[in-house]
Image (cartoon, rainbow, N blue to C red):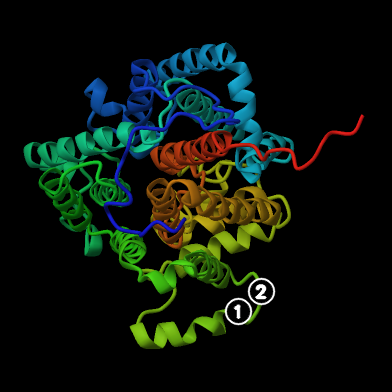
Amino acid sequence: MNIPLTRRSLRRTPPAAPPAGGRALAPQSRGSLITTVMIWVLIVYLAVPLQYFTGDLILAEADMAAPNPLARTIKLGLMIVSTVIVLWKMRLAWLEIRALNAFFLCFLGLVPLSIIWSIEPSATTNRYVSVLSIAVVCLAFTIYGWNRTRFQDVLRPVITALLIGSIIFALAYPQYGVEVGEGTLKNSWRGLTSQKNQFGILASFGVVLWLHAWFNNEKKWWVAFPFIALSFACVLLSRSSTSLMSTTLSTFYMLMVMVAPKSLRRFMPYIVSAFASLVVIYALAVLNVIPGMSMLLDPITSLTGKDMTFSNRSAIWDIIKEHVQLAPLLGSGYGAYWTGPTPASPSYVFLGRMYFYPTQSHNGYLEVVNDLGFVGLFCLIGYLVSWVYQSLQLMKFDRGQGMLFLAIFFQQAITNLSESTWFAVNSAFAIAVVTLATFSLSRGLLEARSTQPRAAPTGPRRR
């Protein structure tokens, strides 16, 4: 049956009982306080520099990157509780792992292998433990206290609280909450995060989640609109052109899905796939993976009057590409390049050639190639294709949820054209949100499929 695609059709309704022959994995619930608090703690401690909690507001960047006892305590505590939940729900955990994005599992396997050839094995090991701890927390979240809107119900409040806290913090302590550099840095807000681009990404998540809450009839307009305005204002205050563009295009996608005429609905999977392919092609053109591909984008640059480098970041990319040539197939090890502005780090070259330390490649796709080589890039592209495929599959059962995960995909795919958030340790809270979305998407699709009736036998069984 064709259901008209309107806001009313996306209204949240209580989950129906499994049909005859259905195989519900677990009863729907209102959620679990334990796993809710775990996600909130995870997001806050990854988004906010821990020095703000300890009172050490004035620290050198190198000191802020140093091992922190509080961070280790939080990480260990989350891993212990999550592991207990996973062992308790082992059968369900195994079912979800089997349904998980296969290329995400490839990434989790490739990273520890990169310790073997890493230029800084200790850094790779430490950062893999961080990523693994995030994955275990997200797995525990989706197997204990699950319901179909749990992803946004838990994520939206903590992101909103961080945005409100950032505004209060920047107004009360502008010397810490507002950047004091030149150019795009001047008067740009970073709030409670470590820098303006991270604040922009956080605010972008807020816009997407609150706009979806209104579209999906989870929140009334008079509740959602003030928070949409608040989140968008934070995007503007961050002065991050990347966050502004990713927010605009991801919200445009949601609007396009909502108002698409009936004649176009059957083509929506093809439209989404074409849009996703365009983003990936743009990323590959920036990387110049296939010589001559950049010519495909000449019309775009001519129309917009802007180059492909997002604020002329090509100088950073050129230095990274030089380093990639040292180990193009497997990379130099996950998280082993950006270990701090010290002479022992290969990234120290930026101080001599550009007179500043960027802390990241400012391109998530290039960052993956630098860390894990073209094998890692293959895993990333497979991961993105699987994300789009799973989201389109989920839309067949639950249009609202499928639309949300696709919106987050577009927001992150565009963000990574000039920021490094695809599993990048310098954007840990973005890793947490993306990983949580990956597990929640797989769990939602697994639950939807499990409640579908099995086909009745077509004839007598032969003896």
Q: Is residue 362 above or below residue 265?
A: above
User: Is residue 63 rendered to the left or right of residue 228?
Assistant: right
Relative image position of residue 69 (x, y in whole percent): 41, 17
Q: Is residue 49 visible?
A: no
Q: Quadrant of residue 161?
A: top left
Label 2 packing within 10 angstroms: few (<14), some (14-19), many (20+):
few
Mark carried by residue 430: none
Q: Kindly identify which residue carries mark 2.
A: 290
Residue depicted at 33% across the width and 17% down the height: 33
With 175 as the anchor, is 445 left or right in this view?
right
The residue shown at (68%, 61%) is 325
Whether residue 50 is situated above or below residue 173 in the rendered picture:
above
Q: Are marks 1 and 2 in contact (CB under 8 Å)?
A: yes
- The amino acid pointed to by label 2 is Ile
How far across and down, in percent of the image, does residue 166 sit? Answer: 18, 39
Q: Quadrant for the C terminus, please.
A: top right
Mark number, residue 293 = 1
At label 1, which amino acid type do we have?
Answer: Met
Q: Quadrant of residue 320?
A: bottom right
Q: Is residue 39 above or below residue 197?
A: above
Question: Residue 366 appears in which quarter of the rendering?
Answer: bottom right
Instruction: Name the element at disc 1.
Output: helix
- Furthest residue to the left? 172
Of 218 and 160, nearer the camera is 218
Does residue 431 show up? yes
